[in-house]
Amino acid sequence: MALEVEAINPVRLGMFPPNLLFAFARWEVTCGFCRTRFKRTVLDLMVGSKMSWVACPACGAHDLLPHHPDVHAKGR
């Protein structure tokens, strides 16, 4: 299992037209582990889905995005 950390300063750059089951979104984040800044397109199955993370290209950590349930549990 990969290390899961909260993404630093995540910015949603845009969304592709969603349908009823999923949406693609473009994110720019800083890795919460190694501090690498990168952009990724993410498939969100639904808001609050466990799939709401992006893998850092430098260290491989899974960076949680703001609507991920684990981030909301921290009081955000």
Image (cartoon, rainbow, N blue to C red):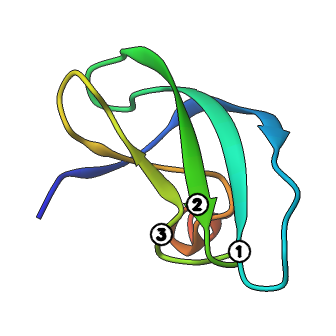
Left or right: 8 in relation to 18: left
User: The C terminus appears in which quarter of the rendering?
Assistant: bottom right
Left or right: 55 in relation to 64: left
Please name the residue shown 47% across and 54% down the image: 53
Amino acid beneath label 1: Phe
Residue designated by label 2: 43
Residue 42 is situated, as x and y percent measured from the top left of the image, at 57, 51
Residue 47 is situated, as x and y percent measured from the top left of the image, at 72, 74
Amino acid beneath label 2: Leu
Q: Dividing the picture into quarters, in which one does residue 61 lie?
A: top left
Inter-mark Cα distance, 3 to 1? 11 Å
Residue designated by label 3: 51
Left or right: 26 in relation to 39: right
Amino acid beneath label 3: Met
Please name the residue shown 68% across and 38% down the image: 26
Residue 31 is situated, as x and y percent measured from the top left of the image, at 39, 28
Work out which residue is located at the far left of the displayed protein and give it: 1
Front position in the image: 44 or 65:
44
For mark 1, give the secondary structure.
loop
User: The N terminus appears in which quarter of the rendering?
Assistant: bottom left
Q: Is the C-beta separation of discs 3 and 1 under 8 Å?
A: no
Q: Is the C-beta separation of discs 2 and 3 under 8 Å?
A: yes
62 up-or-down from 50: above or below = above
Please name the residue shown 19% across and 51% down the image: 3
Residue designated by label 1: 22
Q: Earlier in the sequence, mark 2 or mark 1?
A: 1
3 up-or-down from 21: above or below = above
Residue 23 is situated, as x and y percent measured from the top left of the image, at 74, 64
Which is more foreground, mark 2 or mark 3? Answer: 2
Whether residue 56 is visible here, answered yes or no, is: yes
Q: Is the C-beta separation of discs 2 and 1 under 8 Å?
A: yes
For mark 2, give the secondary structure.
strand
